[in-house]
Amino acid sequence: MLIDISADITLAPVYPGDPQPERQQVQSLEKGDFCNLSTLFCCLHNATHIDAPLHFVKDGRSIEQLPLVVFIGPCHVVSVEPGAIDGQTARKLCPDGCKRLLVRGGGKAYFSPEGAKALAETGLLLVGIDAPSVGGGDTQRETHTAFLQKPVALLEGLRLDNAPDGDFLLLSQPLLVGGAEAAPARAVLASPADILGK
């Protein structure tokens, strides 16, 4: 079974200060137009999205410069308590050999800068979270920088309600937005059998 862990761009909560997404119907079959045609205006950080190093690291890699292998492969889903994830807790989240970690905290968990540094040192390729951001409060820059300098790609705004803790195959490719610091992603969890059709 495939588990869609993406949030709807037009319905997901918007990070304070970011622009509200808007879909506009340009043409409509119902009105006699040639086809249905829409435009979409949104921040690249709306809903489920990936942060590239360029988001907080000067001269960091932009979204199209990150290898796709980062976003496709085995991952581990783990639940945590709401609030800040400190260094000691962060070190216990990732099993040996884990390269992609998705954290469920009811949308209210985030990493302290110390937690981010501890986790980034483990060799992870990607960290995901079901909150709008991996950081909290006035430590956003420090937390993001700790991850992105390594670099660890950040998958934010996940919807993990239907995903139990455990090991999965993650598919979460970002849209190709050349030169951008982030991009929306459609994130899905599966077992290897699902992908192979067995």
Image: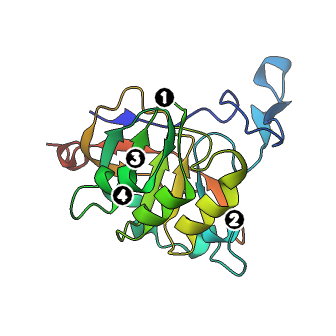
Query: Residue 183, relative to residue 137: is it above or below?
Result: below
Query: Cβ–Cβ below 8 Å for labels 1 and 2?
Result: no
- Looking at the rendering, which quadrant does residue 131 occupy? top right
Question: Which residue shows up at 57% across the image and 74% down it?
Answer: 149
Q: Amino acid at mark 4?
A: Arg
Q: Amino acid at mark 3?
A: Leu
Q: Amino acid at mark 1?
A: Gly
Q: Secondary structure at mark 2?
A: helix
Determine the CA span between mark 1 and mark 4: 19 Å
Query: Cβ–Cβ below 8 Å for labels 3 and 4?
Result: yes
For marks 1 and 4, give the one nearer the viewer: 1
Query: Cβ–Cβ below 8 Å for labels 1 and 4?
Result: no
Q: Residues within 10 Å of mark 1 (few under 14, many from 20)?
A: some
Query: Cβ–Cβ below 8 Å for labels 2 and 3?
Result: no
Q: Position of residue 197 (x, y in %)?
A: 19, 44
Q: Secondary structure at mark 3?
A: strand
Relative placement, left or right, of 133 versus 66 is right
Question: Which residue shows up at 36% across the image and 57% down it?
Answer: 100
For marks 1 and 3, give the one nearer the viewer: 1
Q: Is residue 170 visible in the rendered structure shown here?
A: yes
Reading the image, the residue beneath label 2 is 55
Reading the image, the residue beneath label 1 is 106
Q: Secondary structure at mark 4?
A: strand
